[in-house]
Image (spheres, rainbow, N blue to C red):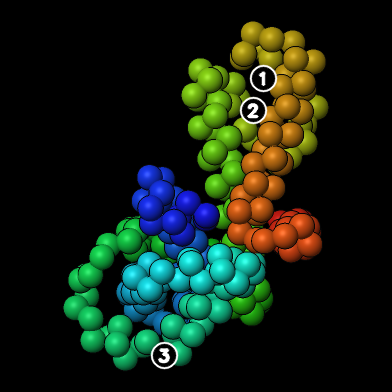
Amino acid sequence: MLAAGDSASPDSREALENLCRTYWYPLYAFVRRKGHSPENAKDLTQAFFERFLEKHYLKDVLAEKGRFRKFLLASLTHFLANEWDRTQALKRGGGLVIFTLDPAVLEKRYSVEASSQDPPERHFDHLWAEAVMDRALALLEDEFRAAGKADQFDALADFASRSPEDGEYAKVGERLGISSHAVAMAVARMRDRYRALVRAEVADTVEGAADFEAELRYLVELVSG
């Protein structure tokens, strides 16, 4: 997030794209839960990101040194309350294309979650937690593939967040040509690295040890619940 907020950084564009990819769907789902149609929710989410980047809101959150999750949701809530008329006046599909997703894919995912009894804010938090975990897993995959261990990642990734069933490590070992003990050790190392990447993702959205520990505990609560 720090790189995304620094327009002078050579990594700014990539960081902004990653930021949008991580948070686009949680924000879209929040807008849908607020009663907007799929098309309007897509347009509003798009327009929010346009405004977010245009007004350099990232600099605000870095200056305030708060929790990015809360800042982002508060910014969107304010946007929805004050920008609906302006957004409706925009030409559909116009402006800067921040990030695009197939509407059918969006609604397929949303329909699975639509029965949630959580308030929109809590639902957003759950999706934020999922997004952080998914982002960390994607970074882990990139590391494995860069190290020439794509086959190992494909075989072990499912164990990053669950325990094996009886005999699973032996089957994976046969596939990789290693012992079940070696598989267990590889999984342990992978989980350690995965946890480190999750912690790094959370740390990049807060300022200070107290906020970091609180946000990390909240993420664990959301994922465990």
Q: Secondary structure at mark 3?
A: helix
In the rendered image of this protein, does residue 191 appear above or below residue 173?
Answer: below
Between residues 130 and 82, which one lies in front from this camera angle?
82
Query: For mark 3, does the 10 Å Cα neighbourhood hold few (<14), some (14 to 19), or many (20 or more) residues?
Result: few
Image side of residue 50 versus residue 75, left or right: left
Residue of label 2: 156
Image side of residue 8 versus residue 5, left or right: left
Q: Check whether the beta carbons of the residues at disc 3 and disc 1 lie within 8 A of each other.
A: no
Query: For mark 2, does the 10 Å Cα neighbourhood hold few (<14), some (14 to 19), or many (20 or more) residues?
Result: some
Image x and y of residue 65, in percent: 63, 67
> The residue under label 2 is which amino acid type?
Leu
Residue of label 1: 172
Q: Is residue 221 visible?
A: no
User: In what quadrant of the picture does the C terminus appear?
Assistant: bottom right
In the rendered image of this protein, does residue 109 appear above or below residue 199?
Answer: below
> The residue under label 1 is which amino acid type?
Val
Image x and y of residue 93, in percent: 22, 70
Between residues 116 and 127, which one lies in front from this camera angle?
127
Q: Secondary structure at mark 1?
A: helix
Residue drawn at x 65%, y 46% as measured from the top left? 200
Image side of residue 77 versus residue 165, left or right: left
Residue drawn at x 67%, y 61% as measured from the top left? 207
Q: Earlier in the sequence, mark 2 or mark 3?
A: 3
Residue drawn at x 76%, y 57% as measured from the top left? 209
Query: For mark 1, does the 10 Å Cα neighbourhood hold few (<14), some (14 to 19), or many (20 or more) residues?
Result: some
Residue of label 3: 82
Q: Secondary structure at mark 2?
A: helix
Q: Check whether the beta carbons of the residues at disc 2 and disc 1 lie within 8 A of each other.
A: yes
Q: Earlier in the sequence, mark 3 or mark 1?
A: 3
Distance of label 2 from label 3 (alpha carbons): 47 Å
Q: Earlier in the sequence, mark 2 or mark 1?
A: 2
